[in-house]
Image (cartoon, grey):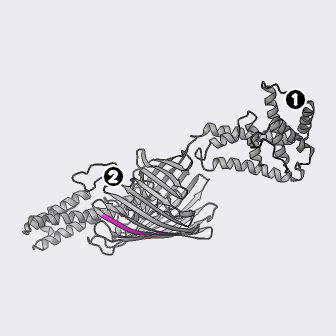
Amino acid sequence: MTILGLLGVTLGVSGTPAIATPLDALSSHSLTDNTLPAIANGLNDELNQTTAVSQLSDVQPTDWAYTALRSLVERYGAIAGYPDGTFRGNRALTRYEFAAGLTAVLDRINEQLNDSSGLMLQREDLEIIQRLQAEFAGELATVRGRVDALEARTAELESHQFSTTTRLNGYTIFTVNAGTQAGVDDPNIAFTSSVGLYLSTSFNGNDVLITHIVMGNDSFNDAVGFLLGDSGAFRNNLIEAGNEITDRALRQRGLSLDNFPNLRLSNQDSIEDIRDTLAGNLQRLARDAEASTSEAQAVFNRVTTAVETAQGINGFLQINSALEYYASENLLGLSQLSYTFSPSSNISVSLFAQDYASSYVDFNRYANSSLRDFSTYGFINNQLLLGNDPGGAGAAVSWNPDAGALTLRAVYRADAAAIATRPSNVGNQGGLFGDPYLGIVEVSYEPSSQFGISLQYSGGAQGDNEYNVLGANLQLGLGETVGLFGRFGYAYNFPGDIRPSSWSAGVTIADLFAPGALTGIGVAQPLIFQEDVINFFNRTQTSFEAFYQLPLTDQISIIPVVQVITNPGNRDESTIWTGTIKTVFLF
């Protein structure tokens, strides 16, 4: 018989609110995963320490007190919680366990005396009770005090709980970010923020409905997001490349761009204006060169496709290198709405109206969350595998046969699941099974917490383009403090007929300089081209990131981050340097 079990039975039959009942009612989804276990464990620890001290004075089955209490229990039915209705003797009890049993007897007798049962207490029983109370007065007072304290704490939890079925968690991220790049006007120091609330609801204990609500600054508000944006060096490079192409076409006719300054692209502001102006200029030059209408139109299409491909690649690198905080927006938004259930012990199935593929695949113990480790998208996800990982609707399944080392996962996500019609000028069909969409399968082998490897395949469509990628994910622990990670991707079907590869790798060190601290250093090349089919990207971007997470409390941490990017945007550009101070609050 444990102390907590005896206390639960004791209060359950006395008419006093039972300990077991409110603790059971406050399920693990009421507050946090650790709140109630901490209370129970704290009481266990406290009482177990007392038990160890009092072992020499245990009440033995041969003691008069033991026999006396047992007779009272059976005569008055004081401990009715046991299946056989008895005291369950034949083993020694600590004095505190004995005092808890005596408390049950006293409460039960008081209850029967106060009701209409007409119970008359026999004189010999009264004398036994008085003797037991005198001998165990100290233990009775201690048990009563602890019960009262636990009742008060339980009542407080009940009055402050969010819901009996829903757990509320959240986070707030504040960052101060600055950066520089030679030859470019430095972006202003930026303050970014993101606030997220998680509502986790369970209906039967084997399922969870997650609602994730976010709000924050606009995406790409940081220095790298600005410097790699369409309006920076990329626009200037595109104008320069477009002017060079136009000049080359004119020289084939014995002319030059100097003769036609109106064909220069310098006055165009947006990438779309540059695209349309350049494509229109080259189309007219083709017609002037007596090309057929279809040939001139083919020139227009090729130029348009090339500019759009370049813009897509630049956007890919921008997302990869910018701070990743769940694509926050200024308005309150729904980031995740998913329902996960387990049809069997080794299978979980998820259905989501809004979520990301990265919620279900490509996990890595050492590089997986901007709340605790790396801050940029390219180090916490395999961007090539996930295809920029836009949100959408779909389903996922995970199968862990016999709870062993092997796990099979699959996820299907449709970006435009809420759009049923196909606009006439857009290649995206919409709907749950229309473009763009992505399906990912993953085989993960993790024989221990120190080692894991995953092999992955993703396939689908990005716009009108077929998309196929192979991926790999590795995690390796060296002892309790050092972790190594690596990701690799190869796309053999990529927009623009480019077949790029990508990789990232790094190391994390726990408890460096302070308990609970985490240090990380990573290096990555997000897009490696085998050949530059549009003659625009002549280098390979390499990204470096280093961070140090310093926990101030269990819920608050400060994380300085340094980021260096060479050949940004896969072009021969000056190196980007950025620094970020990130503060994370968990609640």
Residue drawn 62% across the image and 60% down it: 516
Task: Identify the residue under disc 2.
Answer: 416
Q: Which mark is first along the chain, 2 or 1? A: 1
- Report the span colored magenta: 466-473
Residue drawn 85% across the image and 52% down it: 53
Image coordinates of residue 99 in percent, x first then y, are: 84, 42
User: In this view of the protein, which residue sits in the foreground, 386 or 541?
Assistant: 386
Return the residue found at the far left.
290
User: In this view of the protein, which residue sits in the foreground, 301 or 463?
Assistant: 463
Residue 124, compared with residue 142, is above or below; it is: above
Task: Identify the residue under disc 1.
Answer: 121
Instruction: Identify the mark at residue 299; answer none if there is no mark.
Output: none
Image coordinates of residue 183 in percent, x first then y, are: 35, 66
Magenta: main secondary structure equals strand
Q: Amino acid at mark 2?
A: Ala
Residue 420, compared with residue 295, is above or below; it is: above
Image coordinates of residue 134 in percent, x first then y, are: 91, 38
Q: Amino acid at mark 1?
A: Leu
Return the residue found at the far bottom.
530
Q: Does the magenta portion include 424?
A: no
Q: Quadrant of residue 19?
A: top right
Q: Quadrant of residue 386?
A: bottom left
Give the structural element (helix, strand or loop) at label 1: loop
Q: Does the magenta portion include 468?
A: yes
Residue 445, compared with residue 168, is above or below; it is: below
- C-alpha separation, residue under disc 1 versus residue under disc 2: 77 Å
Residue drawn 29% across the image and 48% down it: 420
Q: Residues within 10 Å of mark 2 (few under 14, many from 20)?
A: many
